Amino acid sequence: MLLPMAADLEPLKSERPHHPLQSQLGSQPAIRLYYLLFALLFLFLLPVPGNGNIISGLQKYYCKIRSGQCALIGCLPKEEQIDCCSLRGRKCCRKKK
């Protein structure tokens, strides 16, 4: 009496080989590409320590809304300081009322 071999008992497998990391990484490469693009976008928008470009930009915008202009050193004699334009000491000035 012959016993059946183990290969005969297994169901037929697909012809495409299964990669061991395929289940961990996802089956669609487009999804992995979206994760990579999201990470790059996050790093691009991350502010550099010590550089307050985002805050300074908002302060300059707020100064213009209040009818002011940013002065590098100080306000002119006919102007008054109403705020700051940057973290480094630029002043927001407008004409005295």
Image: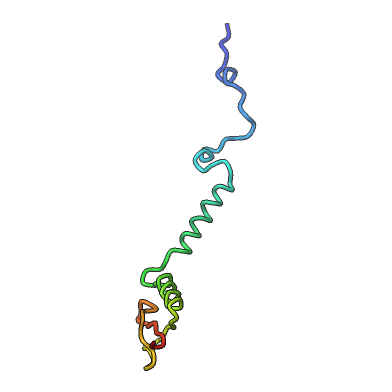
Above or below for 70 versus 37: below
**Residue sticking out furthest to the bottom:** 77
**Residue sticking out furthest to the right:** 15
Residue at horizontal 39 percent and vertical 87 percent from the top = 97
Residue 23 spot, x, y in % from top left: 52, 38
Number of marks: 0
**Residue sticking out furthest to the top:** 1
Above or below for 16 versus 81: above
Residue 77 spot, x, y in % from top left: 37, 94
Residue at horizontal 36 percent and vertical 79 percent from the top = 83
Residue at horizontal 57 percent and vertical 13 percent from the top = 4
Q: Residue 69 is drawn in which quadrant?
A: bottom left
Residue closer to the observer: 81 or 89: 81
Q: How is this picture coloured?
A: rainbow
Does residue 71 appear left or right of residue 36 in this picture? left
Does residue 22 appear left or right of residue 97 in this picture? right
Residue 72 spot, x, y in % from top left: 40, 86
Residue at horizontal 42 percent and vertical 74 percent from the top = 62
Q: Quadrant of the N terminus?
A: top right
Residue closer to the observer: 23 or 12: 23
Q: Residue 68 is drawn in which quadrant?
A: bottom left
Residue closer to the observer: 82 or 19: 82
